[in-house]
Amino acid sequence: MKIKKGDIVVIISGKDSGKEGEVLRVLSDKGRVVVKGCNMITKHIKKTADSAGERIEKEASLDVSNVMILDGEGKASRILYSTDKKGKKIRLFKTTNKNISENFTKA
């Protein structure tokens, strides 16, 4: 999967279209990502003898096809792979051909 934890992405479709956020978790086996502050759902917790019931707001996962990575200029970009001088595989922005891992991730 081309999107990794810590990448800054923009949502391109759905109810949160246009929102930006950091990728908190990648569910690679399902092809989904969890983005901070986006696709919020309300989870209801049933009351027990020890604690009262409550409602929790949390992020739900999005399909990876509904997000695009943001390059340094704030534009949505695709990702391409290349090798550096040492032969190591690197991720590049398609729009600017800059290395993603050097400057643009928070992880």
Image: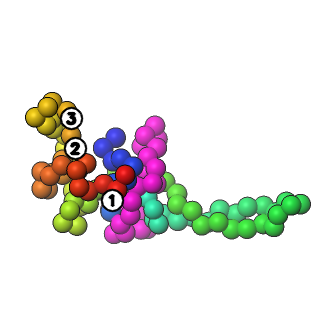
How far from the left and from the top, in percent, is residue 85? Answer: 10, 34
- Mark positioned earlier in the residue sequence (1 or 2): 1
Magenta range: 11-34
Which quarter of the rendering shows the N terminus? top left
How far from the left and from the top, in percent, is residue 62? Answer: 44, 54
Q: Are marks 1 and 2 in contact (CB under 8 Å)?
A: no
Quadrant housing residue 11: bottom left
Q: Are marks 2 and 3 in contact (CB under 8 Å)?
A: no
Q: Residue at x 64, y 66 (%)?
A: 56
**Three-letter amino acid code at disc 1?**
Ile
User: Who is closer to the viewer here, 25 or 104?
Assistant: 104
Q: Secondary structure at mark 1?
A: strand
User: Who is closer to the viewer here, 22 or 107?
Assistant: 107
Q: Secondary structure at mark 3?
A: strand
Q: What residue is shown with label 2?
A: 91
**Three-letter amino acid code at disc 2?**
Arg
Q: What residue is shown with label 1?
A: 8
Q: Residue at x 33, y 47 (%)?
A: 3
The residue sitting at the top extreme is: 87
Quadrant housing residue 52: bottom right
Measured Cα–Cα span from mark 2 to mark 3: 7 Å
The residue sitting at the right extreme is: 49
Q: What residue is shown with label 3?
A: 89
Q: Residue at x 52, y 57 (%)?
A: 60
Q: Residue at x 60, y 67 (%)?
A: 57
Q: Is residue 71 left or right of residue 31?
A: left
Q: With respect to residue 40, does 89 lie above or below? A: above
**Three-letter amino acid code at disc 3?**
Lys
Q: With respect to residue 100, does 16 lie above or below? A: below
How far from the left and from the top, in percent, is residue 27? Answer: 46, 44
- Mark positioned earlier in the residue sequence (3 or 1): 1
Q: Is residue 85 left or right of residue 103?
A: left
